[in-house]
Amino acid sequence: MTLLTLFSTALEKDDPRHLDSIGGITGFQERIASLMKSGDDEVSGFAAIVLGVCGDQSYSRRIGELLEVGSRRPRRKGDWQLPTARGKAATALGLLGAKEYAPKMLTLLRSANEYDRSGSAIGLAYLGDRAQAMAIVRLLRNEKNRQRDAGSAIHALFLLHAAGEYADDIARMLQDEFPGDSGETAAYALAKVGAKEHAKDIAKLLSSQFQKGYAAKALAIMGATEYINDIVPLLGDESALSRKDGALALGVMNATQHAAEVSKLLKDQEEFVRYYAAVALVLMEAREYADDVVPIIERFQQDGSQLNEGDFDPIVQEEFLQIKARFKSSLATLRPLK
């Protein structure tokens, strides 16, 4: 932590002299590199990632040594945690563009250790060789492990600009009985690539207690307005989170025909639901509700709260920023009417 504090201070101040006490950037990297031999799996893997971010390819060989020893840590009785260092080393080598390690990463995609598989998928993607996309897609086709591997596999396909080509494989995640976080990633991924042929697969999740919220927002990002009427029931859901997500999705879809239903949530018992109802009405530019909506928005802004990128998966960050810009513009048109 002392090393990282010095490094972050140097970056923040844009002054490398803050690293003079440890020998500058070279001294920082050498001290980080020494941690790869700490004997602690988490520390070793973290050190590899830091070196990968630093971008000095001269450390590739030393990081590569973790691919051989990173998962040999003896498992103690009752130790459920799988070793992670080898997977993190693979990711770090990808960041460094160390293509000579691609064959080893391909081998690790078949490891019994999920961290080996996920770290290698991301590492291969950073290397930028689209020829490896099929090897990564196989993680999505393995029914036994795909729920664990889907997140990293999907992100890897995006890094390779190949996600659209494998939309059918991504959509398979939505067919699992309990897709969990992987289902959410898959839904947003399909929205990102505009795979409207799979909108029906996402829409099926609108009846699932724990998936309806992200399904509604993914459909909104996708622009699948034919499902607006299927999203409206979320406004009356017993879950406050679902009510919030339903309102936000309808706002993104500019479903002005349902502004009256959304406006009822301005009196919801949950304050955050009232806020998102106001956000939705702003996105709809529903001028008839300006007197109620603008004070709610302004009160939240005074407290430092605003439309949150955490409401969407990082995969659709660009789309979120567009929604945020649209919200800001629409709010400006409503404010004079308060």
Image (cartoon, grey):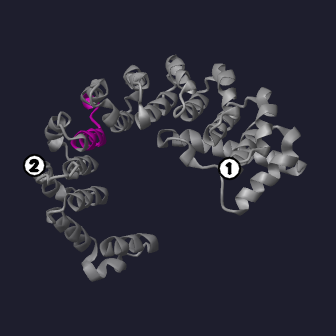
Q: Would residue 149 be found to the left or right of residue 184 on screen?
A: left
Which tag, 2 or 1, sits closer to the chain's start? 2
Q: Name the residue under label 1.
A: 272
* Label 2 residue SS: helix
Q: Which residue is drawn at 20% across and 47% down?
A: 98
Quadrant in which the N terminus is drawn: bottom left
Could one spot residue 149 in this view of the protein? yes
Query: Residue 191 at x, y = what percent?
Result: 52, 29
Quadrant of the rendered image containing residue 227: top right
* Label 1 residue SS: helix
Give the dominant element type of the magenta stretch: helix, strand or loop.
Answer: helix
Q: Mark 2 points at which residue?
A: 68
Could one spot residue 56 in this view of the protein? no
Q: Which residue is drawn at 45% across and 71% down?
A: 12
Q: Which residue is drawn at 21% across and 43% down?
A: 116
Magenta region, residue range: 116-132
Above or below, 47 relative to 218: below
